[in-house]
Amino acid sequence: MLSAGIDEAGRGPLAGPVFAAAVILDPGKPIRGLKDSKVLLAERREELAAQIRARAIAWAVASADVAEIDALNILRATLLAMRRAVEALPVPPSEAIVDGNQCPTLACPVYAIVKGDRDVASISAASILAKTARDALLVELDALYPNYGFAHNKGYGTPEHLAALDRYGPCPIHRKTFAPVAQINLPF
């Protein structure tokens, strides 16, 4: 049975897309040190991401953009990104397990596991791929929108990011429906 682990990155930030990854690990090629991406240092996440891409039976990363987040809401956009990631797998899974308590609609059976990114290796792997892909994009977007510190804050509402929002207003990658952005009465 091919089981795909699914997780997301970027539900809470004020800017940028939400990412999801799906990973089918190869039991014959174990990867040591898989954990929830949030508890790993950035350098270790990058090392593990390379191992996951090299050793997994299949993996895919997908996203839902800011317009989709604003139109659908963050939960529905996250589930959309998850579905896209599973559909992009080069090998279809026979089942999927997702971190959390909400499941995307998939062609295969799907199960939710609270704290799955901590307890299930394939979900940990998906967590790592989603986080490293999103972080890389935010570093790129920092070059386009340098006033907000995206390379450092990854779009989260840090004091510096909130101060930049107050000073410069939102940029095109800000989530207009998120309260700190919506409260600014400037045109997008």
Image: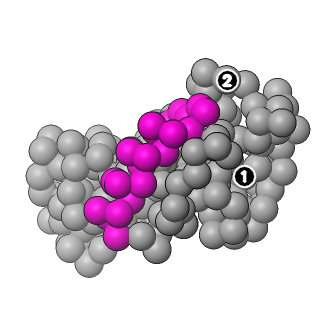
Q: What is the C-alpha distance between the residues marked 2 and 1?
A: 17 Å
Q: Residue at x 18, y 61 (%)?
A: 149
Q: Residue at x 61, y 21 (%)?
A: 90
Q: Residue 183, percent across and down?
A: 39, 64
Magenta-drawn segment: 41-61
Nearer to us: label 2 or label 1: 2
Which numbered tag is attached to residue 55?
none
Q: Main secondary structure of the magenta part?
A: helix
> Which image quadrant: the N terminus?
top right
Q: Which amino acid does label 1 sit on?
A: Val
Circle 2: element type: loop
- Left/right placement of residue 131 relative to residue 158 reads right
By what rule are the colours in the image chosen?
one colour
Q: Which residue, as the protein is rendered here, is positioned at the far right?
A: 109
Q: How many labels does the image show?
A: 2
**75 part of magenta stretch:** no
Q: Residue at x 23, y 57 (%)?
A: 150
Q: Nearer the viewer, residue 177 or 156?
A: 156
Q: Nearer the viewer, residue 81 or 96?
A: 96
Which numbered tag is attached to residue 91?
2
Q: Which amino acid does label 2 sit on?
A: Val
Mark 1 = which residue?
A: 98
Query: Is label 2 in contact with label 1 (beta carbons under 8 Å)?
Result: no
Circle 1: element type: strand
| Circle 1 residues within 10 Å: few <14, some 14–19, many ≥20 | many
Q: Which residue is drawn at 52% across and 61% down?
A: 32
- Left/right placement of residue 161 relative to residue 82 reads left
With respect to residue 129, does 40 lie above or below? below
> Which image quadrant: the C terminus?
top left
| Circle 2 residues within 10 Å: few <14, some 14–19, many ≥20 | some
